[in-house]
Amino acid sequence: MKKLILGLAVTAGSLAFAQTTTTTTTKSMSSDVRFGIKGGMNVSSLSKDGSLEDQGSKIGFNAGLFATIPVAESFSIQPEVLYTQYGDKYDQVVLGNRYSRARHLDYVAVPVMFQYNFVPNFYVEAGPEFGLLVSAKNKFKNETDNNVITESGNYKDDLNSFNLGIGLGAGYYFTDNIGITARYVAGVTDIAKDRPSNSDAVRNNTFQVGLAYKF
């Protein structure tokens, strides 16, 4: 988790630097509602209450739609609907072969981000993300020869179908339409449906980076 938060801080700093050094005149943001599409990469993991360190991370993707709704000067609300891949992955080497065990947890997520624009092109954001679990599968794979050894069926009914996270991020628009985004989402709810009383909760966490296009 510390590495992902550091990554978000570096990304936000880079975006701010890009804004202060650009010499290109860009169009001012419209006061009207803007719709768009976005997509990018997830670096996800699962963390326990008993440890601040994340477990193994897994690469996935996110993609979906959004609307940017101005509510005051420099302030906007951005609701989104995303298909997003969470989970974790462990690697180990046995007799020269590299094996991986991965948990693939796919959600339809609805982030609601509250955004503040320091300047028309650069914003920071924070807000909740509500998710509905649509698929949960485990995969055991020989990465050396790219061979899937075993893959479970969909066991989503055994897990908590609802996921709540808190997002913190930033974005920079190079033009009036095209921008880059970065966000860290820290899980609040336990992924388990029936957690034993004396065991640690396990929560989703992810760092996201991607592109956005406003119509």
Image: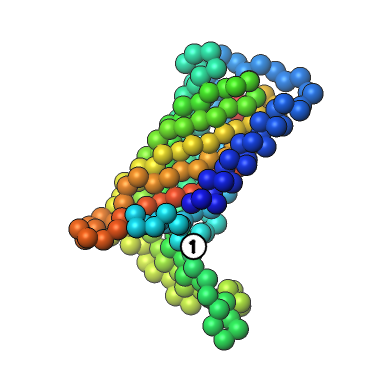
Circle 1 crowding by C-alpha within 10 Å: few under 14, some 14–19, many from 20: some
Q: Is residue 35 above or below residue 108?
A: above
Image colouring:
rainbow
Name the amino acid type tagged 1: Gly
Query: Which residue lies most toward the left here?
Result: 197
Residue drawn at (39%, 57%) of the image: 51
Number of numbered discs visible in the structure rendering: 1
The quadrant where residue 210 appears: top right
Q: Position of residue 189 (x, y in %)?
A: 32, 47
Q: Which residue is mark 1?
A: 56
- Tell me if I can see residue 157 in this picture: no
The quadrant where residue 194 appears: bottom left
Say which of 176 and 168 sits in front: 168
Residue drawn at (54%, 26%) of the image: 35
Residue drawn at (59%, 46%) of the image: 7
Q: Position of residue 123 (x, y in %)?
A: 58, 27
Please indicate whether residue 97 sits to the left or right of residue 103 in the image.
right
Say which of 66 and 18 sits in front: 18
Q: Position of residue 213 (x, y in %)?
A: 62, 32
Query: Which residue lies most toward the bottom here?
Result: 95
Residue drawn at (46%, 32%) of the image: 126
- Tell me if I can see residue 9 in this picture: yes
Q: Position of residue 87 (x, y in %)?
A: 44, 57
Say which of 130 and 32 sits in front: 130
Q: Secondary structure at mark 1?
A: loop
Query: Which residue lies most toward the right here?
Result: 23
Q: Is residue 43 above or below residue 89?
A: above
